[in-house]
Image: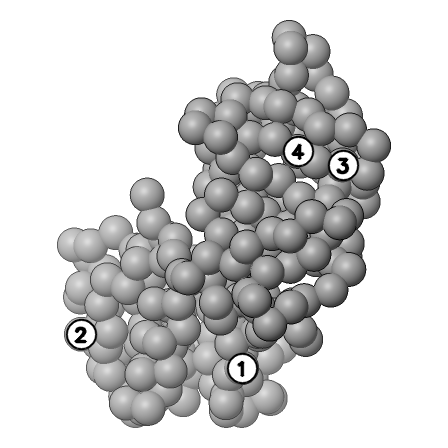
């Protein structure tokens, strides 16, 4: 299931930029956009939204007032042209603060913060998962054993039907699971660049003009829907 997003901004151009960015990320779903925060607040009363991109400087109701006075509220990423609002925004427990004009790489990093927070909440609320996300390693269930894998040892990860293979500098570990779920439990240096591949950007040997990434002597293809993400790697 995709991450349901909403954009609230009184500037049409700003809405168009975020619409474009959201469409570039395969697991995001744009549910609605609004140029009026009051209308947006009414919409939230009846529609479930996971992530809200919210402008601060708007007529009638500012983004800060919107957060303080809206009872039903998704997680928020603030967008604004004014840096001075950053501190007040963070005090309201927002996910991130994006300064306009917003580069795609900055948008994507903010999205990764949201995903990391969502994984932390799920691990607290639900029963223990077979993948334990920590600061420098994970545990995966393979052949009825829980195997510890250091993040820095992972080159890339690929999927085969209902299983994923974790390719490290010394071994390949196979575990049952979906690659879409697994990527959400990894640090931001891991990027999904294909429906079947996740790479460790710290292990990239080279990028080629053939839309592939070279890791450990192996060429990893970049999927059509993930072309824009290559900009994150180059930066």
- SS under mark 4: strand
| Quadrant of image for the N terminus | top left
Q: Sequence order check: which comes first, mark 3 or mark 1?
A: 1
In the visual, does 71 lie left or right of 107?
A: left
Q: Sequence order check: which comes first, mark 2 or mark 4?
A: 2
Label 3 to label 2: alpha-carbon separation: 50 Å
**Image x and y of residue 73, in percent:** 34, 58
C-beta proximity under 8 Å, tags 3 and 4: yes
Q: Sequence order check: which comes first, mark 3 or mark 2?
A: 2
Would you name the residue on which mark 2 appears? 39
Q: Which one is in front in this view, the residue at disc 3 or the one at disc 1?
A: 3
| Quadrant of image for the C terminus | bottom right
Would you name the residue on which mark 4 appears? 166
Q: Pick whichever, 59 or 117, lies toward us.
A: 117
Res. 103 mark: 1
**Image x and y of residue 77, in percent:** 47, 68
Which corner quadrant of the image does residue 182 belong to? Answer: top right
Label 1 to label 2: alpha-carbon separation: 28 Å
Q: Pick whichever, 85 or 196, lies toward us.
A: 196
| Badge 4 density bin: few <14, some 14–19, many ≥20, Cα 10 Å | many
């Amino acid at each position: 299931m995709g991450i349901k997003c909403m954009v609230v901004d009184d500037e049409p151009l700003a809405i168009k930029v975020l619409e474009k960015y959201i469409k570039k990320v395969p697991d995001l779903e744009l549910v609605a956009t609004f140029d009026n925060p009051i209308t947006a607040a009414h919409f939230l009363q009846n529609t479930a939204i996971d992530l809200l991109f919210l402008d601060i400087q708007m007529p009638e109701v500012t983004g800060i007032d919107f957060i303080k006075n809206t009872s039903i509220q998704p997680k928020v990423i603030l967008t604004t042209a004014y840096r001075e609002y950053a501190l007040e925004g963070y005090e309201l427990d927002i996910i991130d603060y994006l300064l306009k004009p917003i580069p795609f790489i900055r948008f994507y990093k903010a999205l990764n913060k949201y995903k990391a927070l969502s994984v932390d909440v799920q691990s607290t609320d639900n029963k223990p998962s077979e993948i334990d996300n920590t600061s420098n390693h994970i545990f995966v269930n393979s052949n009825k054993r829980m195997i510890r894998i250091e993040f820095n040892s992972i080159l890339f990860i690929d999927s085969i039907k209902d299983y994923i293979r974790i390719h490290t500098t010394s071994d390949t570990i196979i575990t049952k699971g979906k690659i879409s779920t697994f990527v959400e439990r990894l640090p931001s240096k891991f990027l999904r660049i294909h429906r079947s591949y996740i790479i460790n950007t710290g292990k990239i040997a080279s990028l080629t003009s053939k839309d592939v990434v070279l890791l450990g002597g192996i060429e990893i293809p970049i999927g059509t829907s993930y072309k824009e993400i290559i900009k994150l790697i180059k930066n």
